[in-house]
Amino acid sequence: MEDVATLSSAPAASLPEPAVAAPEESALLRAALAGDARALDDLVRLHHRRVYGYLCQMTRHRADAEDLTQQTFIKAIRGLDRVDPARPLVPWLLTIARRTALNHFRDGPRWDELPFDLAGGEMSPAGETELRDQADALWARARRTLSAREFEALWLRCAEELPLAETASLMGLTRIHVKVLVHRARQKLLKTATPA
Amino acid sequence: MNSAPSTAVRFACRVARYRCALGAGPAASAHVAGCPACQRHFQAVAALDLGLRRSAPAARPAPAADFEVRLLRSVCAARAPASARAAAGQRAWLGAATAAAFAGALGLAVFAGRPAAAPAARITPAETVAMAAAAQEFSSRLVAAGIPRAAAAVTDNPLQHEFGAVYADLRSAVDFLALNFLPQSG
């Protein structure tokens, strides 16, 4: 029975659920709130890759992701005084990033209709080879197989390792809905991995 | 006949897996405990999660080499106007406070250094009579000197009556002012 419980809850339990900010991040945030420009730059350096990576996955376009990352951090700096230094910064940043991206694409094409352009501009032969290799990778398969919502939920839970509550809050869904999306995503991925 | 039990088992597995994924129920756990297929499924799910987490850094595209520099520059530019606005606000506040203090000090100095108002001069009845006589004389001289000459110049002019009316008005106005605003004699 204990094994069963471990097995049944393993997928969710294996994902970390950080409740408090890392000490380094918390100290940087307090310094930035006190007006330390260098601490603010360090915070940007610490998190910009995650924000950029998330936006790349959502937009599938490097140039858009770069623009949106810049907008995200500018908005974040303007609203920094509303942040609780005791809580992790990443969920808040990703929430801003998501809203910024949604506003950006409100009148344009949907995320899942955008052409795949992660290589950006003209693609070299090496880039094409790399892209083919990546197409076989797990996340590339997830991108092909899953709906935009399922992919986003899976990315936030597994790649960004956000807690369930933060993921639900970020996506504007209930926790159960996020669990269902992740469950469906897993089912689809397992199905595509299994040879017919 | 053979497919019915198989479908039922698969449906039960599906329900149990769904409920377990949602973190529900001992009944689902009991099913998984006795179902090798479901156990294999959850092992596969755990392996999948592990694979997803391990491959996430590779799936996260690296930004361009100069992106960090550009980002920090834009962040710095966004931060600068805010501090400039704050400094400008402080300067404006200081300027206003200085001007207010200066105006206050000036007003205080003027108020403190002002001599006491002189008491109203008493006018004697004789002076009142003299002032009234002076006003009458001024009026008479004005009429005698200016208006008749002008009237003579325009004798038989249609405007003569107008001059006469102006004279009468002027005279009555001076008399009215003298009567009402000069102190009464006696």
Image (tube, rainbow, N blue to C red):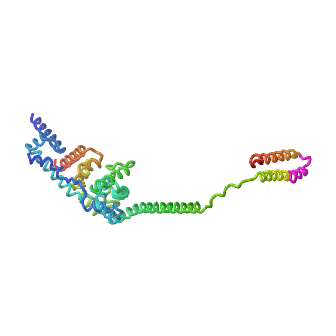
Q: Position of residue B71 (x, y in %)?
A: 36, 62
Seen in the picture, residue A89 relative to B161 is either above or below; the reply is below
Magenta span has A29?
A: no
Camera-nearest residue between B46 and A195 = B46
Residue at x-position 91% and y-position 50%: B152
Q: Position of residue A191 (x, y in %)?
A: 18, 47
Camera-nearest residue between A5 and B178 = B178
Magenta span has B149?
A: yes
Seen in the picture, residue B107 relative to A188 is either above or below; the reply is below
Res. A171 visible in picture: yes
Q: Position of residue A95 (x, y in %)?
A: 31, 52
Camera-nearest residue between B96 and A93 = B96
Label total for image: 0
Residue at x-position 42% and y-position 60%: B82
Seen in the picture, residue B101 relative to A189 is either above or below; the reply is below
Res. B63 visible in picture: no
Camera-nearest residue between A124 and B90 = B90
Residue range (magenta): B143-157
User: Which quadrant: the N terminus of chain B?
Assistant: top left
Predominant SS of the magenta segment: helix
Q: Which residue in the rendered view is the most extreme toward the front?
A: B186
Query: Which of the 4 quarters of the picture holds residue A181?
Result: top left
Q: Position of residue A106 (x, y in %)?
A: 38, 48
- In the picture, measured across the screen, residue A34 lies left or right of residue A150, that is right
